[in-house]
Image (cartoon, rainbow, N blue to C red):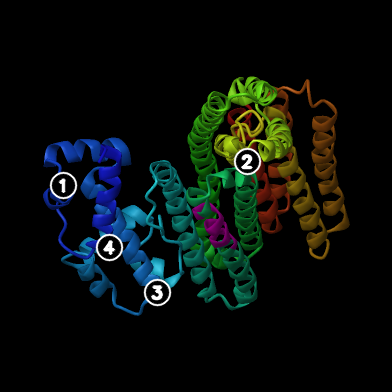
Amino acid sequence: MDKETSVLHSLELIENCISEKLTVENIAHGVYFSKYHFQRIFREIIGDSVMEYVTKRKLTLAGRALLDSDASILDIALNYGYDSREGFTRSFKAYMGVSPKEYRKYGLTAISQKDVKERSKMTYSKTTDEIIRELNNFIVKAKDTANASRKCEVTEYIPFWNVISSATDKYADRTKDVLNRITAIAEHPDEIINRFSIVKVLDDIAFQSNLIAFNVGLTISRGKPEHITLQKALCDKYLELARMASLKSAKITGFFNELSTLIFDDMRQSAVERLNTIIDAGKTAVDGITGYDYIKDEITNILDSLSVPAEEVTVNLLEECQFKLSIISIAFEIDICRNPQDKAMLKSLIKLNDSVSEATEFFKTLVMPESNPIMERPVRERLLDIVYQVNVLLFYTRGEIEKLSFVISAKQKESLLPICVKIDEFVRFAHSAFDDIKTEQIVEMLSAIHSDMTAKSDYLNEFGGPFKFIANELKNLTKAVPKWLE
């Protein structure tokens, strides 16, 4: 038994005895290795120490028990070898990103739900685990924030907070849906081709979270001073959640880049191995056939067409080889009708045909890095994001002017309109001068708009809160521009 087979066998042993007291010694003994040698090869193959792996499996199964049973958290902790609820909670939160209570309350996704026994899939699982941990943590934060907003006691704002909490719950649930797609990648690595659509959903969720935080701040800024004070903590919660959403989205994009690199490397190696299998099967077929030179010559031609770097082999090329082999096989079978004693030669040709067929199916799922690049937003797209956010602020500025029409004079309203013109001019300029626009120009123009808006908010006195809030958002965006466009 080679060392990799022995380690994989030890995983079965761990799975079968997961509720028992497991030590490195008794696991190593079960696969006939010394403790020292077993620890070394286990980490080399699995990437974790023996007891790190055991702990992760215990916590994964404990997570499943939290979802699938009504057993108390203490009973589940004891069942998986923990002496106390507190110790179990610390370990669980460190691994899953949330406490056992939160995990059960919100029905979150278990990390590494399946007992994966293939080395490559274990490697993928480690990275998908990181992504799942981040998303579990965000879902709990979103759900808790939504629950907190439902408890607001400022009567005039209860309908508003109901709308906000409902919207927050929706994108938290949407995040849970994303988890199912991510957990599938460790089992089906070709699903990595969908990573762009997954990240797009997470970016949308981050945008929605920031938009809700903006609406919360803007709405509360219109209120009475005492109401603003009473609801500041909730505003801060939504602002914190928005920051978290943006950070999680960026962090998960990094994890996907890491994961895709691992998968693409394995796919490339598997492609090489499958092509080598075809070449070996072809050579065996040629060596095993005697007296049929036209058959041997055509097989050799097929092998020559596949004796190129894996990156140059396409599904079309393999399907063409399959087609040629089907012609060869029929011709050979007909010839054998006249020479039944040569029937044994057909076996090696069938094996070659099978290996080409298997490679063709594999190459249909194969995505090389060149066609699915590392996810990094180009400067042009980042600049578009800035312009889009400024446009959003223009939309809300116009909305605030319309709302103020009922409480300010016509002259005051008229004085606010130039701000909208300036913002609109910036948006138009940024679009028209896209390739030549400089970071300094963006900062200068936005800073000027911010100054004007701040002055107008002071001019409006008690009605200037919303303008001051939008001006502050514009200031934060202006500060972020140099970093975004690096």
Q: Nearer the viewer, mark 4 or mark 3?
A: 3
Q: Please give the name of the residue rendered at 45% of the width and 51% of the height, measured from the top-left corner.
A: 134
- Which mark is first along the chain, 1 or 2? 1
Q: Is residue 283 above or below residue 350?
A: above
Q: Is residue 146 above or below residue 311?
A: below
Give me the C-alpha separation between circle 2 and circle 1: 41 Å
Mark 3 lies on residue: 68
- Of the residues shown, which amino acid type is indicated by label 2? Ser
Q: Nearer the viewer, residue 290 or 223?
A: 290
Q: Nearer the viewer, mark 3 or mark 2?
A: 2
Label 3 crowding class (10 Å Cα cut-off): few <14, some 14-19, many 20+?
A: few
- Which mark is first along the chain, 2 or 3? 3
Mark 1 lies on residue: 28
Q: Is residue 326 above or below residue 53?
A: above
Mark 4 lies on residue: 89
Mark 3: secondary structure: helix
- Is residue 242 a member of the stretch shown in magenta? no
- Which mark is first along the chain, 3 or 4? 3
Mark 2: secondary structure: helix
Numbered badge on residue 357: 2
Are the residues at dot 1 and dot 4 in contact (C-beta closer than 8 Å)? no
Q: Nearer the viewer, residue 462 or 87?
A: 87
**Where on the picture, by quarter, is residue 332?**
top right
Q: In the rendered image, which quarter contains the N terminus?
A: top left
Are the residues at dot 2 and dot 4 in contact (C-beta closer than 8 Å)? no
Q: Nearer the viewer, mark 2 or mark 4?
A: 2
Q: Nearer the viewer, residue 150 or 116?
A: 116
Give me the C-alpha separation between circle 1 and circle 3: 32 Å
Q: Please give the name of the residue rendered at 68% of the width and 49% of the height, measured from the top-left corner.
A: 470
- Majority secondary structure in the magenta region: helix
